[in-house]
C-alpha cells in the first residue's frame, strides 16, 4: 500500500490517504512537544519506537478482544490503519497519581489508587484540551451516551490488559491516554497510538521514568529511556513467542 495525499500533519505523526478510502497510513515523526506545543524538540529514533511499540500493543489488545484501528506495519515508521472519525475526547486512565492529577489535587506522585480512575479532556488544541466531565461531553455533542459507556468499558479493560503486559516486563503502568474513533458502521474502536509519548511507564524496581516525562521535565537520558522501554517489550515478547512455539 502506497502513501497518497497528506491529509493531516500533527505534532507527532503525519496522516496520509491510501488508494482504499477505508484505510490510512500514519507515519511517526521524531518531533516531540509538551505543554500544548509550548515546548518543542526532537527525540532521535522516537518515531520508530512509537510506531513499533504502538503496533505491538494494539496486536496484543486485539488478540484479547479490544477492537483497534491497527491493520499492518508497513515499515519502521509507517502503519496502515482503519480510517475512523475520531471522537474528540482524550481518555485518561490512571492507576497512580502523577502529572496533572498529582498537581491539581495535591497528591504525592506515585500514590497508588485502590481502583483505577478515568477522566476526559476535550481534544481541542485551540482551547488547550480542557478537562471535562461526561455531561459536558454530551452537552457539546462530542459523543452519544452509549458511546461514552462503550469508551469507558474499553478503556478500563485496556488498562487491565496493559497493566498485566507491562508488569510481566518489570514496568508499572502509571497512567495513559487513549483516543477512540467511529467506523462507518458506527462501532467504536481504539485509534491513535499507545507509546511512551502517551503513557507513564516506571521501572517497577527503581521507579525510573521510561517515558516522555524525561523530555517534559528535562530529566536527561530521553533517547536511552525510549530504547530501554522498547527493549523491555521486545525481549519478553520474543521469549513469549519462543515459549508459544515450543508448546505447539
Ligand atoms: P495531534 O493531532 O495531537 O498533533 P498526532 O501528531 O499524533 O496528534 O496526529 C495524528 C492525528 O491522527 C491525531 O489527530 C489523531 O486523532 C488522528 N488519528 C489517529 N488514528 C486515526 C485513525 N485511525 N483515523 C483517523 N484519524 C486518526
Ligand atoms: N497524555 C497524552 N497527551 C496529552 C495529555 C496527556 O498522551 O495531551 C498522557 C500523558 O502522557 C500521561 C497521561 O496522559 O500518561 C496523563 O497525563 P496528565 O493529565 O497527568 O498530563 P500532563 O502531566 O502530561 O500534563
Image (cartoon, rainbow, N blue to C red):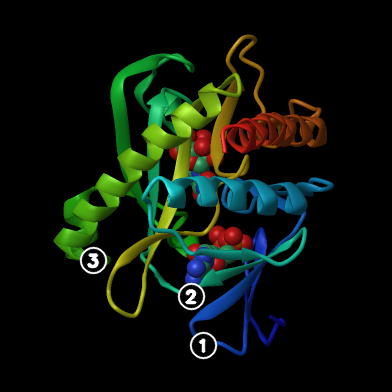
Which mark, by number, is residue 83? 2
Quadrant in which residue 227 is drawn: top right
Position in image of residue 54 (x %, y %): 60, 50
The furthest residue to the front: 248
Q: Residue at x 60, y 19 (%)?
A: 170
Work out how far the residue at label 1 is from the one at label 2, CA to CA, in angstroms.
8 Å
* Residue 140: mark: 3
Residue 104 horizontal/vertical position (percent): 39, 28
Q: Secondary structure at mark 2?
A: loop
Q: Are marks 3 and 2 in contact (CB under 8 Å)?
A: no
Q: Marks 3/2: CA distance? A: 23 Å
The dot on residue 21 is: 1
Q: Is mark 2 within 8 Å of ligand 1?
A: yes
As measured in the structure, the alpha-carbon distance from the residue carrying label 1 to the one carrying label 3 is 29 Å
Residue 42 in percent (x, y) is at: 80, 49
**Residue 214's image quarter?**
top right
Q: Nearer the viewer, residue 166 or 177?
A: 166
Point out the tag, 1 or 3, that comes first from the N-terminus.
1
Q: Disc 1 or disc 3, which is closer to the eye?
A: 1
Amino acid at each position: 500500500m502506497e502513501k497518497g495525499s497528506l491529509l493531516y500533519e500533527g505534532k507527532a505523526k503525519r496522516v496520509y490517504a491510501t488508494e482504499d478510502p477505508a484505510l490510512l497510513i500514519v507515519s511517526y515523526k521524531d518531533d516531540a512537544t509538551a505543554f500544548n506545543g509550548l515546548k518543542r524538540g526532537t527525540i532521535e529514533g522516537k518515531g520508530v519506537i512509537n510506531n513499533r511499540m504502538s503496533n505491538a500493543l494494539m496486536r496484543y489488545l486485539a488478540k484479547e478482544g479490544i477492537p483497534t484501528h491497527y491493520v499492518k506495519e508497513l515499515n519502521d515508521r509507517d502503519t496502515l490503519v482503519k480510517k475512523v472519525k475520531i471522537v474528540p475526547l482524550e481518555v485518561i486512565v490512571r492507576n497512580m497519581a502523577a502529572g496533572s492529577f498529582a498537581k491539581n489535587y495535591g497528591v504525592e506522585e506515585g500514590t497508588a489508587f485502590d481502583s483505577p480512575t478515568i477522566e476526559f479532556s476535550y481534544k481541542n488544541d485551540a482551547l488547550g484540551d480542557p478537562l471535562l466531565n461526561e455531561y459536558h461531553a454530551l452537552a457539546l455533542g462530542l459523543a452519544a451516551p452509549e458511546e461514552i459507556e462503550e469508551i469507558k468499558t474499553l478503556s478500563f479493560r485496556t488498562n487491565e490488559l496493559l497493566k498485566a503486559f507491562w508488569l510481566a516486563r518489570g514496568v508499572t503502568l502509571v497512567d495513559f491516554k487513549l483516543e477512540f474513533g467511529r467506523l462507518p458502521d458506527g462501532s467504536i474502536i481504539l485509534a491513535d497510538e499507545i507509546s511512551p509519548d502517551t503513557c507513564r511507564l516506571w521501572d517497577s524496581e527503581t521507579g525510573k521514568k521510561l517515558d516522555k516525562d524525561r523530555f517534559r521535565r528535562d530529566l536527561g537520558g530521553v533517547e536511552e529511556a525510549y530504547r530501554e522501554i522498547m527493549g523491555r517489550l521486545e525481549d519478553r515478547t520474543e521469549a513469549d513467542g519462543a515459549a508459544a512455539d515450543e508448546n505447539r
